[in-house]
Image (cartoon, grey):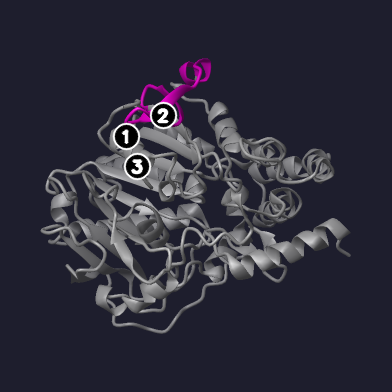
Amino acid sequence: MLLPWLASFTAISSAFAAKSAGQIPIRGGVIGGVPTTQSATVKPETLQPFATTPGALRVVQNSGICETTPGVAQASGYGDITSTKSIFFWYFAARNNAATAPLSLWFNGGPGSSSMIGLLQELGPCRITNDSSSVTLNPFSWNTNANVLFIDQPVGVGFSHGTESVGTSLEAAADVWTFLQIFLKDSRFANLAANNLAIWTESYGGHYGPTFAAYFLTQNAAIAAGTVTGLNLNLKTLGVGDGLTDPISQYPGYITYAGSNPYHPLVSTSVITRANTSWNTATTGCKARITACNNAGSNSVCSAAQSFCNDNILSPLVGNFDVYYVLSGSNDPYPPDITSYLNSIRTKIGAEVTWQETNDDVYDNFAATGDWMRSSLPDLEMVINAGVRVTIYDGDADYILNFNGVEAMIASLNTKFSAQFNQQAFAPYKVNGLLAGQFKNAGTFSYVRIYGAGHEVPAYKNGTLAVGQAAFQFFSQTMANQSLAST
């Protein structure tokens, strides 16, 4: 039987699910919940067959959709990694110096959510209008000085289709690696193989980003050793926004943020007290469950940890506010929905299935393995120590991956730059002389907290700064292999 406060929350969550979509699914009335009827193993699901070309791309070039800057190339379509697994991509060449510009990959999170979210709501060449009917050109697009490749993954997400067998971040990394081998061997894009490569991601990208980057580096080493064949991926940069990386350090952030954040308390002290108890209870509490999961815990142990912690900590502590932007109620319509627009242009960009923001089957595959609660911190540490430039960013109005948790995760890092980073105080981060946040650098590692931004940091503005302007600055500085700096 549900406790009264939990029953009330469940009703709120159900209303939230009906009115306000987001990157992280609501299952059983719980944000980031675990389905009650599932096995502990991934259940592959195969969709209808398509005329695929395994090991090759199927491409629509220069559709004229979204990027309307004269002379800027774009391409969209599928990389068929097998006859039954097709990954959708949408590529935009840099507006400036495309031949030598770095290639930046973009991944949204979920798990199970489409990277078209980032394209149309956040950082792409065009941005959805508030009535969701059309798009406008984005002057702060991340393809201004970088070639940007938006990838719908794992298979089954967004416009991607096929056998939905991926249930862990590592399995996702292997498919993305295979896709990139296909993409960069194609004659239309082979010139990009020698350019610097970047991974940028958000939300569940706190798992994806470090795991993908570490996998790429491992594969590169195997290629150099002659044990794997393939193209070396010239990885130089990793960027992670509002990311879930290390649950054991991040989950106390929900308790802290709910009671004290830059804006207003989210719930009563009694709800916070219950959450504290749920965190600390020996053996059966959230902390104990996450610890057990990461001590070689089984899929069922990790899945149960996700279920318990999100039911008892993550979900109840947001109260009646939007988990992605606490300055709004639970049905915040911003950023605007992109579903109808994407499906209206689907055939023009070579997409073959109806678009949906999140594939619940893919999400359920991840929930079954408990991937959510497995820490990606070791991978992040490996990538930082390998010399990849890493920027972590967060919006201070985001609850679901709040800055308290992200900054605690960063403080727990053990890298060659950690001591130097942790000894510093934050400095003001300014954009054209206007305060946009606060930041720290140490070596090739940087962190910035952006004021007034929700979960999708590039979708927000601050003061007189334009939408996406602050995010464009930290992206541009990082991609230029520079530490963050005020302007």
Q: CA distance from mark 2 to mark 1?
A: 9 Å
Q: Does the CB distance between marks 2 and 1 fall below 8 Å?
A: yes
Q: Which mark is residue 470?
A: none
Q: Which mark is residue 478?
A: 1
**Residue 349, percent across and down?**
26, 73
Report whether residue 55 is seen.
no
Residue beneath label 3, please? 469
Which one is earlier in the sequence, the residue at label 3 or at label 2? 2
**Which range is magenta?**
419-444
Quarter of the view holding residue 79? bottom left
For the residue pair 44 and 72, the one nearer the viewer reads as 72
How crowded pointer 2 is (Cα within 10 Å; few <14, some 14-19, many 20+) is rated as many
Q: Which mark is residue 446?
A: 2
How crowded pointer 3 is (Cα within 10 Å; few <14, some 14-19, many 20+) is rated as many
| Nearer mark to the viewer, of 3 and 2 | 3
Q: CA distance from mark 3 to mark 2?
A: 18 Å
Report whether residue 403 is seen.
yes
Q: Name the secondary structure under disc 3.
A: helix
Is residue 310 shown above or below 182? above
Q: CA distance from mark 1 to mark 3?
A: 14 Å
| Nearer mark to the viewer, of 1 and 3 | 3
Residue at point 35%, 46% (across, down): 199
Name which residue type carries label 3.
Gln
Name which residue type carries label 1.
Thr
**Residue 264, percent across and down?**
67, 40
